[in-house]
């Protein structure tokens, strides 16, 4: 066990032996394990995952690891925020243990085994970030093998990632329940993200175009819009008018396969990825049929 300043109540672990011994001790007590993998720079969205775990499981483990293999060559790995001490303080009362793996542990010398992600990873984020999901699938599988939780909690803001992990866990028969948790937004509707820290006040205002586009598209669908191409064109124009600097995609898709919908029917998922100057943001909206 390692100690961190200011957080005497939460044990932290950074070795395989230590985290496995902690989990084994919990198992001997008959306790269930919930797991929340994060890259740190924690916010209320992360804490909502830990809170869900605390409700559903006896023990909650949170990991903090900025995974280099899910960043592309021109992406923000080197400047990604790493406020570890602040993160540990935030976890006080939300986690029973924190796992802090190192690069040497996760990717030792001569590491060469990678998880080939499922087909659902190929479009959308997979098109614009071609190596991203290989890194995500590999690190998540490794973390699940190390922590061996009963349940693992992921936010729906990374909707495609959630579907990739669910499919990987199902295909590889990993004995864990994957739990998706709702997006947490600020008071203006902006989906919480660690990358929001990059935004200036003016950029934050323009970033609201994402959630407002989702609001507008959902209203259109609920009012009877069924032409997928027309809806996607309207979403793209709404984002451009809202001041995004560059648009990667704005689509309506099947929530299970992520195939684009030419004829919109519910359930459906709206997915967006856009740049506000140099900051790339994603958002989505799962639209379910209205109950009678």
Image (spheres, rainbow, N blue to C red):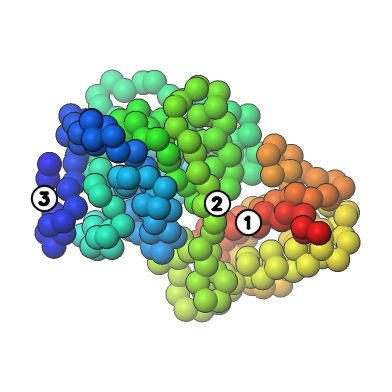
Q: SS class of the residue under badge 1? A: strand
| Residue at the image position 47 percent from the left and 78 percent from the top | 201
Query: Which numbered disc, 3 or 2, marks the residue that appears first in the sequence?
Result: 3
Which of the labelled discs sits on residue 3, or is there none?
3
Q: Identify the image quadrant of residue 139.
A: top left
Tag 2 and tag 1, C-beta contact below 8 Å: yes
Mark 2 vs mark 1: in front: 2
Q: Which residue is mark 2?
A: 156
Q: Identify the image quadrant of residue 113.
A: top left
Mark 3 vs mark 1: in front: 3
Residue 287 horizontal/vertical position (percent): 71, 56
Residue 237 horizontal/vertical position (percent): 76, 66
Q: SS class of the residue under badge 3? A: loop
| 163 relative to 90 in the view: left or right | right
| Residue at the image position 58 percent from the left and 48 percent from the top | 159
Q: Which quadrant is the C terminus positioned in?
A: bottom right
| 158 relative to 69 in the view: left or right | right
Which of the labelled discs sits on residue 275, or is there none?
none
């Amino acid at each position: 066990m390692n100690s961190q300043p200011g957080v005497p109540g939460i044990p932290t672990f950074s070795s395989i032996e230590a985290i496995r011994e902690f989990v084994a001790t919990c198992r001997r007590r008959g306790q269930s394990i919930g797991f929340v993998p994060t890259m740190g720079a924690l916010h209320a969205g992360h804490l909502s995952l830990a809170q869900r775990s605390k409700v559903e499981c006896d023990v909650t483990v949170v990991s903090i690891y900025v995974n280099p293999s899910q960043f592309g060559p021109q992406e923000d790995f080197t400047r990604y925020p790493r406020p570890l001490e602040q993160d540990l303080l935030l976890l006080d009362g939300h986690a029973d243990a924190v796992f802090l793996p190192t690069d040497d542990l996760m990717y030792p010398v001569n590491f060469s085994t990678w998880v080939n992600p499922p087909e659902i990873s190929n479009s959308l984020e997979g098109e614009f970030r071609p190596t991203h999901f290989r890194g995500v699938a590999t690190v998540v599988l490794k973390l699940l093998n190390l922590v061996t939780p009963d349940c693992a909690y992921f936010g729906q803001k990374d909707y495609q990632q959630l579907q990739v992990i669910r499919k990987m866990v199902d295909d590889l028969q990993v004995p864990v329940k994957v739990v998706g948790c709702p997006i947490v937004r600020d008071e203006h509707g902006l989906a919480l993200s660690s990358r929001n820290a990059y935004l200036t006040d003016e950029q934050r205002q323009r970033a609201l175009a994402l959630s407002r586009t989702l609001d507008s598209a959902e209203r259109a669908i609920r009012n009877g819009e069924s032409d997928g191409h027309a809806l996607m064109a309207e979403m793209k124009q709404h984002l451009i008018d809202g001041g995004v600097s560059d648009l990667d995609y704005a689509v309506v898709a099947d929530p299970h396969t992520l195939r684009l919908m030419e004829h919109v029917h519910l359930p459906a998922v709206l997915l967006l990825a856009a740049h506000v100057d140099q900051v790339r943001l994603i958002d989505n909206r799962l639209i379910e049929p209205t109950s009678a």
